[in-house]
Image (cartoon, coloured by chain):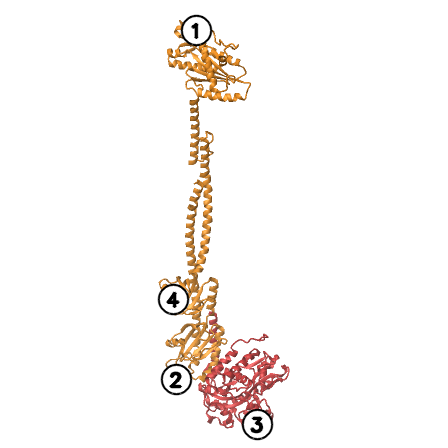
Chain colours: A orange, B red
């Protein structure tokens, strides 16, 4: 796998997973906050409703107390004769009740019940229907009768209108004033009852329902729905008693906290609040409402995490590309170029980091390689002793020159094969060291004799070869051969000895004699051998070997005849001065 | 809310404060007379009594029978010596301990009283000396009417367009209901639930046309004189008295029959001057004075000795003395069973309890 996909497959999870993890934590936190906010909202709603209800209750209690202490009500209660009550007192009493109702329109019914439960006086707002005048048998009245000493507040479904109402009842205890104006024992004269329509509460519940989507229900201890927020499909369904019991239990353990329980067929966040004695406020919010919030929240968090993760990964990849991938690619390209002996191809990296170090090392390595390469070349193509090109290099050079010559038909090329005469004696007499020095001196003289476009090489032992380029005629070869013979004929000074030697030269001409390098060298060798046979210190053309009768002066290409008589002539310095 | 409670409290305290001082205790040398408001008793007769007995008569007035009851409730029957009480209230008042049984030996003039009135109501002979009797009818402004008024209760309940919103109904439950029952052809004392329901509906239908459920001022400043009220359920005597202040006021006794009311002089149980109270009642029943009082108030008298002393024109006035057949169709309010009374109270509240909605926006 390439580096880039590797990096991508590494970096993407490395970046995105932590971001997603962070998102998950955020989501949890926000979801918890939403849950807490919802609970708070429910607690606030419950408190608001409870306080509103309590205010209504307190006001009604105050009013029923006020009413029960009014002279008219007391006179009425003390008047036992029905006729007197109804003829004389009731119109005034109804008027008084009506005045209260004008001030408190929610008091749609104000009652005076006799101790036996007979509905003696009933003032209603509007044409409120009346289920019965004999209230004595209703459970409400029986409860009232069972504790008849204090103000009783009850929430119930009105038997007259089936809507939830609050009834505040005050037992009226009065003692009759006798003729002596001393009061006898107090007797229960009846009950003064205000029935209050909970319109304000209903409006509050509706506004809470509209504003917060909270379900609100007022229930009694049995779980009957006394007042419920409208537009719920379950509306007036009672709360299961076991659910109510569990809620009460949980309330006892941790008050003012909502719990999730199954309610009306779905998990629901529930809060139970004791609004008044034996009256509960059940605030509910279906879990799915919260789930919707959580889903929305989760989507947002995942979206943000993904986008930011991808963005971060992209930035990281771009950074990695510039910091790592591209330098590595450059280094690889440079290494490849160096492999192809392009030692100048070094990466343009100058960063002060490890990769920069690597690039610098590579550059150093290339320089070293180049140096080794040159040394190797020198070793392979040059003669170690004289520094002249060796046979291999001479042959390759010659091949190149021959190929070049093929494109220039009017030019000639000559190969001179030179063998020193008497070198063996020098070696034997003066030693190898002297021999080697002689060879070096010969090399120098050869190099000094030839032209710049020519090349001298040592083929081995005391054999040398010279390639002469750009000849327009063989005379030129003659001249150079002469100069070489002359140059070598000069005495050499070796280790305090004066040494005189000569050389035999064979000449082969291209393209006259051939165009193959190996052949040409061989021909020149053959011609040199001929020169040796003919008395040394001379040169011979290969061409003359093939045509001995040719009119070209070929017999004697030698120097003065004296020279060839006793060479090599070695005389010590001492001797020569003798 | 607290503001409203305060308001309510103030209202209650005010009501209590107003109710109590109505002559709670008579000052020495003063006779307190609980009397109909405005021009019922000839002031000359009062002055004569004051002169004869050297005592000040203080009159406390009530406008309707229900108001009088409220006043007595407020004072628990205290503070008054003599009161004029409607016949059908005598028993309740008496049983409630407000009225003292008559000491007949202190009332020599009782011999002149028509016995049919003395026994017209339960307990009437125990507590009351019949004074004047009257009938209910419709008083109206002839000049403000576009045409003659039918002699029926119908125009009162379905007034001509120009009268709508100018009708006054008596604030007395029994009377308003009684005339509604009469208008429907039922007995004024009906306790038949169907008939009562029909009467209630009639009263409810009438509501938009009613300017006020109350009492009419009988004097020069009356709303009927000024024309604000052009039609009213009224006693015949009051209507004729009003005519003194406006010539175009007319009265009609509807042909369906009507309700006959009788006022009785009574002595209050808690009076500290019962002897003087009896003397006052006896004084008013001197035949000549009784005739004078009847003439003054335009009501027929219960005093037989006084009748011959009245001018023939008085006797012949059909507004004062309805024709016998019309009288035969008329009734006196009878005692009804208590629970029916309770129903009537509630019925009346249902009629007057809610604000009046007038399509034409008059007050």
Relative height, residue A543 to residue B34 (above, below): above
Q: Secondary structure at mark 4?
A: helix
Give the mark toward the camera: 2 or 1: 1
Q: Which residue is mark 2?
A: A180
Specify few, some or many for label 2: CA neighbours under 10 Å numbering under 14, 14-19, or 20 or more: few
Circles 3, 2 touching at the beta carbon (< 8 Å): no
Relative height, residue A380 to residue B246 (above, below): above
Q: CA distance from mark 2 to mark 1?
A: 197 Å
Give the mark toward the camera: 4 or 1: 1
Q: Which residue is mark 3?
A: B309
Q: Whole-percent x and y of residue A146?
A: 37, 76
Residues tagged by mark 4 and mark 2 found on one chain of the structure:
yes
Q: Which mark is residue A565?
A: 1
Image-based side of B149 in relation to A477, left or right: right
Give the mark toward the camera: 3 or 1: 1
Q: Which mark is residue B12?
A: none
Circles 4, 1 touching at the beta carbon (< 8 Å): no
What chain does mark 4 sit on? A
Q: Which mark is residue A244?
A: 4
Q: Earlier in the sequence, mark 2 or mark 1?
A: 2
Circles 2, 1 touching at the beta carbon (< 8 Å): no
Specify few, some or many for label 3: CA neighbours under 10 Å numbering under 14, 14-19, or 20 or more: some
């Amino acid at each position: 796998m390439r580096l880039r996909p590797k990096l991508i497959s590494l970096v993407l999870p490395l970046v995105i997973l932590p971001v997603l993890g962070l998102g998950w934590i955020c989501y949890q936190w926000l979801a918890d906050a939403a849950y807490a906010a919802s609970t708070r909202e429910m607690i606030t709603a419950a408190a608001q409703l409870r306080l509103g209800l309590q205010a209504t209750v307190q006001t009604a209690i105050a009013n029923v107390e006020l009413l029960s202490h009014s002279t008219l009500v007391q006179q009425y209660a003390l008047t036992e004769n029905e006729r007197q009550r109804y003829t004389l007192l009731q119109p005034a009493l109804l008027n008084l009740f009506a005045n209260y109702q004008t001030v408190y329109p929610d008091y749609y019914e104000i009652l005076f019940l006799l101790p036996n439960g007979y509905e003696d006086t009933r003032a209603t707002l509007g044409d409120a229907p009346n289920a019965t005048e004999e209230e004595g048998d209703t459970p409400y009245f029986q409860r009232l009768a069972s504790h008849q000493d204090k103000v009783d507040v009850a929430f119930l479904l009105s038997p007259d209108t089936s809507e939830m109402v609050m009834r505040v009842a005050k037992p009226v205890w009065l003692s009759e004033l006798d003729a002596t104006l001393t009061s006898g024992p107090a007797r229960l004269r009846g009950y003064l009852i205000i029935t209050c329509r909970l319109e304000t509460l209903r409006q509050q519940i509706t506004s809470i329902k509209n504003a917060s989507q909270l379900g609100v229900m007022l229930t009694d201890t049995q779980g009957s729905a006394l007042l419920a927020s409208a537009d719920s499909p379950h509306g007036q369904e009672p709360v299961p008693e076991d659910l109510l019991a569990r809620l009460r239990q949980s309330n006892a353990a941790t008050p003012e906290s909502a719990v999730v329980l199954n309610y009306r067929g779905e998990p629901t966040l529930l809060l139970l609040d004791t609004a008044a004695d034996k009256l509960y406020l059940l605030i509910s919010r279906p879990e799915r409402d919260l789930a919707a919030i959580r889903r929305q929240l989760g989507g947002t968090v995942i979206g943000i995490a993904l986008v930011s993760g991808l963005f971060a990964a992209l930035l990281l990849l771009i950074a990695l590309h510039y910091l790592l991938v591209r330098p590595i690619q450059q280094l690889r390209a440079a290494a490849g170029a160096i492999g192809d002996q392009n030692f100048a191809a070094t990466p343009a990296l100058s960063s002060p980091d490890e990769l920069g170090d690597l690039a610098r090392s590579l550059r150093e390595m290339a320089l070293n390689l180049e140096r080794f390469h040159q040394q190797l070349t020198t070793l392979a193509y040059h003669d170690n002793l004289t520094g002249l090109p060796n046979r291999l290099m001479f042959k390759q050079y010659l091949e190149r020159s021959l190929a070049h010559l093929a494109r220039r038909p009017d030019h000639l090329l000559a190969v001179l094969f030179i063998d020193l005469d008497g070198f063996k004696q020098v070696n034997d007499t003066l030693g190898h060291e002297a021999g080697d020095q002689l060879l070096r001196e010969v090399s120098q003289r050869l190099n000094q004799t030839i032209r710049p476009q020519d090349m001298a090489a040592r083929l081995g032992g005391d054999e040398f070869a010279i390639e002469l380029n750009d000849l327009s005629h063989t005379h030129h070869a003659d001249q150079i051969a002469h100069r070489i013979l002359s140059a070598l004929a000069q005495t050499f000074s070796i280790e305090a000895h004066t040494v005189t030697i000569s050389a035999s030269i064979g000449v082969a001409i291209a393209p006259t004699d051939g165009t193959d390098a190996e052949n040409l060298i061989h021909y020149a060798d053959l011609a040199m051998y001929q020169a040796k046979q003919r008395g040394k210190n001379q040169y011979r053309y290969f061409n003359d070997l093939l045509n001995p009768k040719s009119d070209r002066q070929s017999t004697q290409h030698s120097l003065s005849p004296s020279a060839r008589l006793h060479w090599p002539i070695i005389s010590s310095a001492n001797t020569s001065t003798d | 809310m607290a503001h409203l409670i305060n308001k309510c409290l103030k209202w209650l305290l005010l009501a209590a404060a107003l109710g109590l001082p109505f002559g709670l205790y008579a000052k020495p040398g003063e006779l307190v007379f609980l009397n109909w408001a405005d021009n019922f008793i000839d002031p000359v007769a009062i002055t004569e009594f004051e002169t004869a007995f050297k005592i000040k008569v203080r009159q406390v007035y009530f406008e309707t029978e229900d108001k009088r009851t409220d006043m007595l409730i407020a004072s628990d029957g205290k503070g008054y010596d003599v009161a004029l009480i409607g016949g059908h209230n005598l028993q309740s008042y008496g049983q409630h301990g407000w009225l003292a049984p008559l000491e007949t030996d202190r009332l020599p003039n009782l011999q002149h009283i028509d016995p049919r009135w003395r026994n017209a109501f339960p307990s009437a002979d125990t507590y009351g000396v019949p004074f004047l009797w009257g009938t209910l009818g419709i008083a109206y402004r002839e000049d403000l009417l576009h045409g003659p008024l039918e002699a029926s209760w119908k125009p009162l309940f379905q007034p001509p367009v120009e009268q709508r919103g100018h009708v006054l109904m008596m604030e007395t439950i029994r009377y308003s209901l009684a005339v509604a029952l009469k208008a429907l052809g039922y007995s004024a004392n009906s306790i038949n639930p169907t008939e009562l329901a029909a009467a209630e509906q009639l009263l409810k239908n009438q509501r938009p046309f009613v300017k006020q459920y109350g009492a009419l001022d009988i004097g020069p400043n009356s709303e009927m004189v000024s024309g604000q009220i052009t039609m009213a359920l009224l006693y015949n005597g009051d209507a004729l008295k009003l005519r003194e202040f406006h010539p175009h006021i007319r009265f009609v006794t509807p042909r369906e029959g009507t309700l006959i009311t009788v006022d009785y002089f009574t002595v209050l149980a808690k009076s500290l001057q019962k002897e003087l109270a009896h003397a006052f009642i006896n004084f008013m029943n001197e035949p000549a004075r009784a005739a004078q009082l009847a003439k003054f108030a335009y009501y027929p008298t219960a005093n037989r000795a006084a009748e011959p002393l009245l001018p023939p024109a008085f006797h012949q006035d059909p507004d004062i003395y309805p024709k016998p057949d019309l009288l035969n169709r008329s009734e006196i309010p009878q005692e009804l069973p208590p629970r029916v009374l309770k129903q009537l109270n509630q019925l009346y509240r249902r009629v007057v309890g809610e604000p009046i909605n007038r399509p034409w926006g008059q007050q």
